[in-house]
Image: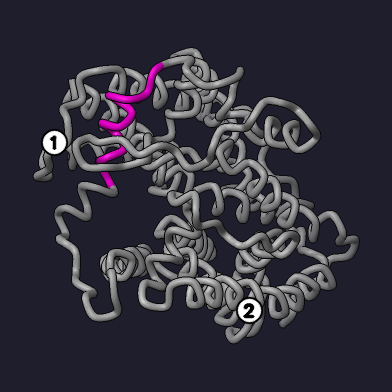
Amino acid sequence: MLMIAFGILLVLAVWGWCFSKDIFSPFVLQPGVWCVILLLYQILPHDFFPLVNDFLLSLIVWNIGFLLSAYLSFYYTPSSSRRAVEATPNKLVIQSYFILSLITMPIVIGIIIWIAYVEDPVNMFRYLRVMNTGVDENIEAPDLGVLYYLVSMTYVLLFFVLLYGRGKWVIVLVLLLNLLFAFVTMAKTVFLSVLLPTLYIAYLNKKIKLKHICYGLGGFFIFSLVLQSLRGASSQDDVQMVNITSFLSLYLLSSLPAFDYYVQPCESYGWGGHVFRLFYAIGHTLGSDIVPEDTILPFVSVPQFTNTYTVLYPFYIDFGICGIVFFSLLYGVAYGFLYKKTMTGGKMAQVLYAISLCFLILEFIGEFVFTNLSQEIQHVFFVVLPFLCNRKKQNVSD
């Protein structure tokens, strides 16, 4: 069954390439990434359980639903208007983003590092990771209030300076702020969320070539090995490099058997408990008795321990196969729309599509849109605001 699923996805990926001639199109990325993951599951040495339950069928349904609606959405979405192509963000808003980022990001990063150092100076790197994942109920991330919203602002600012900034030092400075925050989270997905959109926007605007993206991803892989060693160190003296095969299998493949063996349809607490978690959280804050689902999912043995379950998890556990069908169609419509606007020159769409690329590429790990809906709403807000505020055509200077 695994090779049948691989064959279907390979055909869809080749068809997507023939249609778009663009490796970054959703028509190629969506089935293509899953092709690579399934192939690795077949050929990479690992001790994970065989995929014999609902995962492969759910994956095929997800991809077919996504691509069907993405093709239709792309076809029926009108090209970007001349106004959208020529749109520039408001200079004052971008300057405000920049000043606020320079003030707040060092504070955020400094507080997080200081807490980790004070609480556990010997195992500081491990403490940073635990603090930002919530796997230990006795260790919580600091409550920084409104400062966390400004982290999203700094993230969005990076793509504005890439598109409109005139000074290289501005780009380097904003990129450094984002990378430093990613480092204190000790999370590879956060690093990727900075790296991938940055490389894509540079590639889309012909500032780099495809080979430079490959170099960047290769550098990220090496860095990930070092980061994993730091996270696993119990003291400053016992940092050891991880086994590459074990590292790849754990982070690329463990989500598949976790879904296949541990996720049951329509099992969540409350209707749409995971998909609509944000609304349950708001209701709980306002006095509702319904406790929202935890964003940190339980660890399971496959037989290695993991707590990631692929993009399919919230839709399947909330609504079963019907949820996978519905949300695959919804995802496809959104990606088809954004890709059409991006390819026809829409500047705002470029930023939004660049950010959303991470969700597509990391589907084998988890779902990042509805799970982090509050954060994604912040991203959209900070992207749209400078364009809404601009009434004159002007370039953003440094």
Q: Position of residue 353 (x, y in %)?
A: 57, 49
Q: Which residue is drawn at 55% across and 21% down?
A: 269
- Point out the image quarter for the N terminus: top left
Closest to the observer, 371 or 173: 371
Q: Which of marks 1 and 2 is nearer the N terminus?
A: 1
Residue 260 part of the magenta segment: yes
Give percent across and percent down for residue 136: 44, 51
Tell me the quarter of the image containing the C terminus: bottom right
Residue at the disc numbered 1:
42
Query: Of the residues shown, which amino acid type is indicated by label 1?
Result: Gln
Residue 390, compared with residue 261, is above or below; it is: below
Secondary structure of the magenta portion, mostly?
A: helix
Q: Is mark 2 on a helix, strand or loop?
A: helix
Picture quadrant of residue 192: bottom left
Badge 2 is on which residue?
Answer: 106
Q: In this orientation, which residue lies closer to the viewer: 261 or 8?
A: 261
Q: In this view, does 199 lie to the left or right of 9?
A: right
Segment tinted magenta in the rendering = 252-264
* Res. 45 in view: yes
Going by the image, does 63 lie left or right of 190?
A: left
Residue 211 visible in the snapshot? no
